[in-house]
Image (spheres, rainbow, N blue to C red):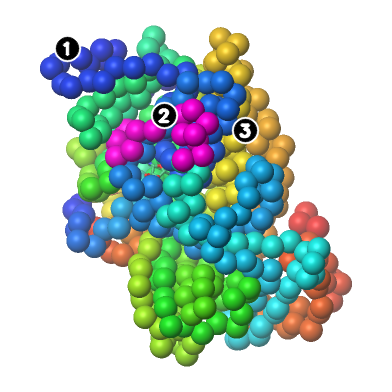
Amino acid sequence: MEVDSSLCLRCGACVSICPVDAIEATDSYVRPNERCTDCGACRKICPVGAIK
Amino acid sequence: MHGLRRVPENLSGRGDKVMEDKYDVVVVGAGPAGSTAAYSAAKNGARVLMVDRRRELGVPVQCGEAIAEDILNELGIKPDRRWAVNRTNAVKIVSPSGIEIRISEKKVTGKVGYVLNRKVFDKFLAVRAVKAGAEAMIGSYVNGLVFKNGRIGGIRGVGLDGKFEVAADVVIAADGVGSRVARWAGLNTALRFDDIETCAQFQMVGVDFESLSMLEFYLGSRISPGGYAWVFPKGDDLANVGLGVLGSRAERRPIEYLRDFVSRMPGLSKGKIVEVNVGGVPVCGPIEETVGDSLMVVGDAARQVNPLTGGGIDSAMRAGTIAGEVAAKAVEEGDTSKERLKEYERRWKEAMGKRLTRYLKAKEILLGLSDGELDKLAEVLRGVKFDRISLTDMLKVLVKANPKLLWKLRGLL
Ligand SMILES: Cc1cc2nc3c(=O)[nH]c(=O)nc-3n(C[C@H](O)[C@H](O)[C@H](O)COP(=O)(O)OP(=O)(O)OC[C@H]3O[C@@H](n4cnc5c(N)ncnc54)[C@H](O)[C@@H]3O)c2cc1C
Ligand code: SF4
Ligand code: SF4
């Protein structure tokens, strides 16, 4: 799973839905860490479709 | 119990740049929940540090910015034109087929609300905390808790000067919808798809709306399944136009639903978009357990949002204020155990637990209604003259007109 940083507005919706707390969200970037199981939940919830 | 993911107690041996310090209370997040918590902890004598990853508080905006005056009165905060940019006293609710219900508060004695400028408001609340004696670390991302003998003893993160670690007697998790702090402490706050409204909003200029003092709500599965669209006026021809879609019912991105909504509304489609905001709103009702040893969870992190309206600024400020006070008192008494911190849980439940449960129930009932059923209810309410904006008043009218509804609405009245 990858976040398109030109679309992401750092809203945190993906972080709240991730079942395994695998998303780091700073003021500059949002990205999954090694715990990501590629379940796709974040992709589905992202309001702007920034997660590919 | 808390030893889920321990980190070494002292990281300084690794050659990282570590700012060591100790506070009575560390607040993670400087939104409405965090800033009110930091303020009230500092006011009650605690040494407080408030940490936020944002370099500019309140930015990006993730909010429709509507608030009722009650919370400002409760906390003795005087509305200021710099952040309370528009005063409202009426609502319009539009049913799926376009039936309009208008409700105004009584002119003089009625309640008012405000449309805020969150960029200024969030900063104002943070400054209020700092002026009360709290310290603030802005642009600092908290990426873990520090555990000491299996119990929360502080936080660690990365800031403008590199890595840092701060010890604390109490950590207050005010880190918003995407909260991780509570999860690190072992509370599972992960949302499911029917727990969250996924939202998009345009700030638009050059738009028409009915009245500057009226908040508009639009219902319907075509507009926003499992949610609603809103038009909140901010100035002469300026408004927040947004919508939320229930995660489990969304077939498209909220931003696509919003484009459709705007294009179908003549008063809006001629406007220009000057800001795009998105976000998630937890609508599952508050989490049951909001304290642990040395830990309190407040605001969106604790899902203390009105599940029907999605409004969470007021609850966040109410909970934050209580949490800060309890934290300071607990530290002073030398007992920051879960048992001691439960005073916070008892008090926030007293202040708003019942109300949030009732709105949760109302939301669940609404979600069970078809567009046609919503239209029928709107038909009943259309002609009625209400003199205040009240869910109870509306329900009473509905049940009177249609006694069969009673079983569905029981428990709400
Ligand atoms: C589109 C939309 C419209 C809304 N409209 C309204 C409305 O009209 N009225 C209303 O009352 N409510 C509304 N809400 C809800 C409202 O915005 C929230 O309830 C409110 O902001 C909650 O405040 P908070 O302090 O709990 O969280 P937030 O305001 O989200 O603040 C959390 C803070 O924590 C910081 N943070 C998070 N993680 C970390 C970390 N790891 N390290 C450091 N800092 C961190 C963030 O940067 C942020 O500043 C809306 C929400 C959305 C998404
Ligand atoms: S949900 Fe989408 S826009 Fe929001 S932080 Fe995640 S990737 Fe960015
Ligand atoms: S794909 Fe699933 S596990 Fe990976 S970051 Fe997204 S929500 Fe988390």
Residue B42 seen? yes
Q: Which residue is mark 3?
A: B322
Choose top left, top right, bottom left or bottom right for residue B142. top left
Chain letter of disc 2?
B
Q: Point out the tag, 1 or 3, that comes first from the N-terminus.
A: 1
Q: Left or right of B378: which side holds B155? A: left
Quick one: B50 or B130, which is closer to the camera? B130
Marks 2 and 3, how far apart at CA: 19 Å
**Residue type beneath disc 2:** Glu
Which label belongs to residue B13?
1
Q: Element type at marker 1?
A: helix
Q: Quadrant of the C terminus of chain B?
A: bottom right
Quick one: A48 or B38, which is closer to the camera? B38
- The residue lying furthest to the bottom in this view is B266
- The residue lying furthest to the left in this view is B15
Chain letter of disc 3?
B
Q: Contact, CB < 8 Å: mark 2 with mark 3?
A: no
Where residue B204 appears, as percent x and y from the top left, is 42, 76
**Residue type beneath disc 3:** Ile
Q: Which residue is mark 2?
A: B135
Near mark 2 (Cα within 10 A), the count class, few <14, some 14-19 or many ≥20, is: many
The answer to whether residue B141 is magenta is yes
